[in-house]
Image (cartoon, rainbow, N blue to C red):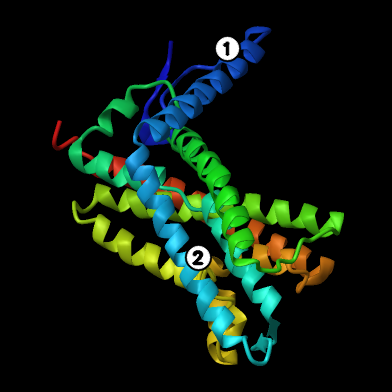
Amino acid sequence: MKIVTARHGFMLKSARRRGPNRKMMIASGMRKYWVIFKISWQKELEYRFNFFLGRLRNIIVMLLLYYVWYTVTKKSGKFAGYSQIELITYVFGINILRAIIFGAQSKQVASDINDGSFSAYLIMPINHFTRTFSAEFAQRSLSLVTALAEVILFSSFLKVNLIFQRDAAILALFSLSIALASVLYFLFSYAMSLLAFWSREAMGPRFLFDWFLEFASGAYFPIDILSPALASIFGILPFASIMYLPMQIYLGRTGVRGAWQGIALQSVWIVVFFPMVLWVWRRGLNKYTGEGI
């Protein structure tokens, strides 16, 4: 068996076999990541208090933003080109998108590198990138269930009117945009965690990055309510493609053509950043010492 070291890619693996066993190997590989998904789901349920605190934080942010925009639009019924119902829908929709797009497993990579537990993954026959994404997908799936329950509960309690998009084409583009936004966020988050290869203080830059990403991605407000100059600056950054774009598509403010243009831009950013993450991974492994084992 030929062993390909992790220094040459995201995983350690056996040489590929040719012939009928190829399909079996692919199926076996998929089962591995399905098992990781299930274990991660169970782990999230096991640490219920941590999960509850995370959801509580999102609920507080959602309600705070709701009351801000409700107060601002109470008299005129609109603000910066948005109607009250659009802004309220944006707030509740963002709570759901947070659950789908944002995750914490990629952040754990930095801690694993710092304490040396990352070494265990280097001897496993798995792709570390895919393994981390599978674990994060489990967390996101559980968060999505609770986020939907939160939106239904609080929108009913507050008796708010929301926009329910019924256009099948818009909904399809919205779903595609969310999928690409999830991948794009994961690339950013994973790359930031890999800074731990060079510094044990990687969590500091990560915190600043997470804060800026939420602000620049439109997680607190639609980016186009800013001044034209600031909106243009944030609009050309890749972060706007993570939260702001999907919600604009859902609200029908982009139209079908604008939605496709936004999705094309998301795809371009993914194509650009994935090789960069791979390059950082390879360079980082050359620096890794396994300190803390």
Q: Which image quarter is the N terminus in? A: top left
Q: CA distance from mark 1 to mark 2?
A: 51 Å
Residue 27's x, y, as percent? 61, 17
Q: Earlier in the sequence, mark 1 or mark 2?
A: 1
For the question of whether residue 244 can be seen, the reply is: no
As shown in the figure, which amino acid type bears the numbered disc 1?
Answer: Arg
The quadrant in which residue 45 appears is top left
Number of numbered discs visible in the structure rendering? 2
Q: What residue is at 74 percent from the left and 66 percent from the top?
A: 163
Residue 30's x, y, as percent? 57, 22
Q: What residue is at 55 percent from the left and 40 percent from the top?
A: 141
Residue of label 1: 17
- Relative to 116, say whether 169 is above or below: below
- Check disc 1 and report its element: helix, strand or loop: loop
264 vs 96, left or right, is right
- Relative to 70, say whether 41 is above or below: above
Residue furthest to the left in view is 292
218 vs 195, left or right, is right
Task: Answer few, some or many: residues within 10 Å of disc 1's Cα (few below 14, many 20 plus, some between 14 and 19).
Answer: few
- Relative to 79, say whether 127 is above or below: above
Residue of label 2: 62
- Relative to 111, say whether 216 is above or below: below
For the question of whether residue 43 can be seen, the reply is: yes
Residue 64's x, y, as percent? 46, 72
As shown in the figure, which amino acid type bears the numbered disc 2?
Answer: Met
Residue furthest to the top in view is 20
119 vs 137, left or right, is left
